[in-house]
Structures are given as C-alpha cells and as structure tokens.
Amino acid sequence: MSQISVNDLTFYYEGSYDNIFENVSFSIDTDWKLGFIGRNGKGKTTFLNILMRKYSYRGSVSASVRFQYFPYPLTEAQMDMSASEFIGDIRPDCEEWRVICELSQLNEEADILYRPFTTLSHGERTKVLLAVLFSGENDFLLIDEPTNHLDSAARENVREYLASKKGFILVSHDRDLLDRCIDHVLVLNRKSIDVQSGNFSDWWENKQRRDKFAAAENEKHKREIKKLKQAAKRTAEWADKNERTKIGFDPVKEHDRCISTRSFIGAKTKKMQSRVKQMENRISHEIEEKEGLLNDIERVAELKLSPLVHHKNTLVDLRDYSFTYKGAEKPVIEGLTLTVNRGDRIALHGHNGCGKSTLIKRILQSAGMETDLGDFTESGICETASGLVVSYISQDTSFLKGDIWSFCDSRGIDRTMFGALLRQLDLERVQFTKDMSDFSEGQKKKVLIASSLLTPAHLYIWDEPLNYIDIFSRMQIEKLLEEYRPTMIFVEHDTRFREKTGAEIVRLG
C-alpha cells in the first residue's frame, strides 16, 4: 500500500482569474476504492488530468504509482478499427488475453474485440475500455463517469465489475454505483475538501447531520451577535452621553460638579469606550465564525415550473405502432400501444438501441417540431393532441456555442429569470460570459434543463437529462417533479430518479 499526497495544490486555467484549486492538501491510499464527488465545474475531471500530468500547477502531487485514465481518448481512425487493433496504441503493455479475461467478468464475449469499435453500443464500448484499463498491473486507475449513456443492464454489469476491484478513483454522479463500488469518499465542498471512509449513503448521512449541526450553531451565533450589538449600542450611548456632559460643562446649571468629578467621568467614559471596542471585536469574531460554519452547506434551492394545461386529456396516442429504418432487417419499434394523458410521467426503459430516442423524435415530429429521422417506414397510429406545446431536452450538447445571453436571446427567454435559475442550479455567475463550448458536460446540461424549465409546455420530453449532472442538482430536479407533477415522457437510467419521480415504466425492446 502506498499513498498519493497532494500538498498546497493551486491550479487555474490560462486566461481565467478563477482558481479551480487553491492551496489544497490531502492524502489517499492506493488500495482505496475512492468515490470523487462534487458539483459540476468544481474540478473533478481537472484533478484527474492533473494526476495524468496534462496540466501545470503550483504545489506538489507525489505518488509511487502509474496512473491510467478512463475513457481513453480515441481518434477517428481508431473508432473505425477493432479494439484488438488499437489496444497496443493506447496501452503498449496490454496483453489481449488479459482483456478477454476482464471481458468475461463483464459478461461479454471476446468477439466484440474484433468488431469495428464504432459499431458497438455505448455499453459495449464502455466494457471494452474498462477491460483494457484493468488488464494492466500495478496501475492506479482514474475512472470518469463510466455509466453515462448506459442502459440499466449495462450499469448493473459495471457496478458488479467495479465492486470486485480495488485501487481507483471513480468520478460519478450515479448514487447506486457509488453505494455499490466505493469504500472511501473524496468530496469537493464549496470551501474545503473532505476525505472519509464509507460509501455515498454513509457520506450523505454524515453530511446532513453536520449541516444540521452547523445550521443550529449558526442560529445560536446570530442570537449571540444580536445581544452583543444591543449591549454595545447601550454602552456606546452611555459613553457618548457622558463624554458630552464632561466637555459641555455648564457651571451655572451644574454648580456642584467639581474638577475631580469631571476626571472621574472621563475615566469612566474611557473604560466604557474600551468595552464597546471589545464588544465590536467579539461581534466581528462571531460573524466570522458564523460564516465559516455555513461555508460548506449545500443550499439546494427549490426550483419552479409553470406547465400549461391542455384542453384535451390525451396528449399522445400510439396504437399498434411500428417503426423501421430504410434498409433495416427488422423494426426498431414494433406493435407499441401507449397513451399519455395529462399528469402522466412515462419513463421509457430498455437496452441501448431499443428505440427510445427514436420514439421520442417521432412524437416530437408529430407535435410539429423539426427532427431528423432519416428514411423510414411506419405502421399503426402515432398522434399528438392539436396545439400541443412540447419542451424538449436532447442528449446532444454539441450545438451549445457562444455565451449564455446569446443562447437566451435565441430562444426568447427572459435573461433575468434564466440567470437566476442557472444560479439556483449552482452555475457560477462568472460562467455567464464564457463560451459554452468550453463548459463541462454537466454545465451544458444545466443550460438545457434551465431552458426547458422556463419554457411553459403541455408536455416535457427529456432524453437522458441527468447525464453528467451532479448529485445535488439531481435531487433538486427530483423534488421539482414531485411537487409540480408535469406531464412527462423521459429516458433516464438513474434508478433512484425514476423511483423518486413516481414514473410509470414503459419497456421497449
């Protein structure tokens, strides 16, 4: 067992005035299965890249292990190759037989190594790259969001696989994955970094307890500060009053006041003024302590939604519906019957490639929205209510470019409301003037979620909205949907999210 020691780490991106890390210090053991948690944009992926020596920084990072990073960056040429052809390029020390052994633990046959990588599903690609990652020896593994875009079955395979391993840092917002696979947690708080033993639920329980204690202490400090301010005010008023009488002595009205009395009053006033100063210093200290208590409390703001109410009860009607792409051997959707009424929350569920996104796009097309479905044939009925207004979140974020205000104006969204909602989702104000193409994937998703929430609609259609979204924001969105109960169709493989929203699960494939 060895350690990775971080001492006084400071890092910022060139051209930025904001420090991602500032004088950060902590140590972790290389035998740990470490979950890495934090808000979007706080520096989780950045830290992994620092360990990979991709960035220059101040401070020191010492480790006696070699780091390997998931996902491997693949070129377009490698995407057209089979994994067996490019394994040696990304891991020169990797032996194919070891990769095959790792694949068997992931319940995959060896043949996926010999198919063009671009033809593999998201789940198959993840499994191949994880198998390559774990096929080396004496490496400490850095794993970044392995379950994004994976269906439930693939996620379960990855959970079981990682639970059997040790010696890695896992960046993830998948609460089930973190509970199953890790034994320590590294948390990027707002103003500090914590390292503690246990899984996600252990950390969350401790955090709630600490936050509750801090909030109680904060209220106590507020009361103490109020009392001190009142006492200081009274003392200051007495001192000022007596100082004025000493200076403004009237021998006619105050003929009995002698020189010795005046000197006594002066000394007393000086003492009281000193006491006021002490109280002010104590107040300042109390305020500083109070603010420190609240530095790391996650203020999960309540989000709001203004759904429209359609005059018809049935918004989407599919009867014996089938969809086939031109040239395909079999339909991607076959014989589906589904009715979406006002107030329904429908979770489309199934393996990757079963037609979830295709069905969403076809419903959007029926509602009058432009979607690229290519050449296809269909049978059965796919109808939407007339005048149906849909708010849509796509999986794709690649089109987000320019600053937030330009995006806002292009969609006719009120700037003030949009900015306020993004701040509630914990997007830093400094990001508002930056190019969105430089945002993290989680930050891009928050832009799309905020846009959808500010679009009054009869029906909300979200396609994997939580990919890359941090845990705290997931909880915000869960609470929002529980409270407002909008009519929804969504695809989301986060089991806890589906359960929290009380969605009806419709299985495809």
Image: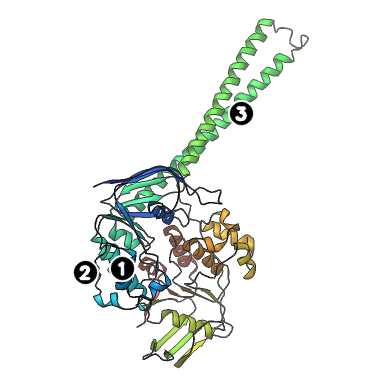
Residue 373 image offset from top left, x and y in percent: 49, 84
Residue 313 in view: no
Residue at the (42%, 56%) spot, across then down: 45
Distance in Å between CA atoms under marks 2 and 3:
79 Å
Residue 419: x and y in percent read: 59, 59
Q: Which residue is mark 2?
A: 97
- As drawn, the label of residue 233 is 3
Q: Earlier in the sequence, mark 2 or mark 3?
A: 2
Q: Nearer the viewer, mark 2 or mark 3?
A: 2
Q: Quadrant of the C terminus?
A: bottom left
Local secondary structure at mark 2? helix
Q: Name the colouring of the figure.
A: rainbow
Q: Quick one: label 1 or label 2, which is nearer the N terminus?
A: 1
| Residue depicted at x 56% and y 69% | 306
Give the number of the disc on residue 87: 1
In this rendering, position of residue 45 left or right of residue 455? left
Q: Quadrant of residue 26?
A: top left
| CB within 8 Å, label 2 to label 3 | no
Q: Nearer the viewer, residue 504 or 27?
A: 27
- Image side of residue 49 versus residue 28, left or right: right
The residue lying furthest to the right in this view is 252
From mark 3 to mark 1, how far is it between C-alphas? 74 Å
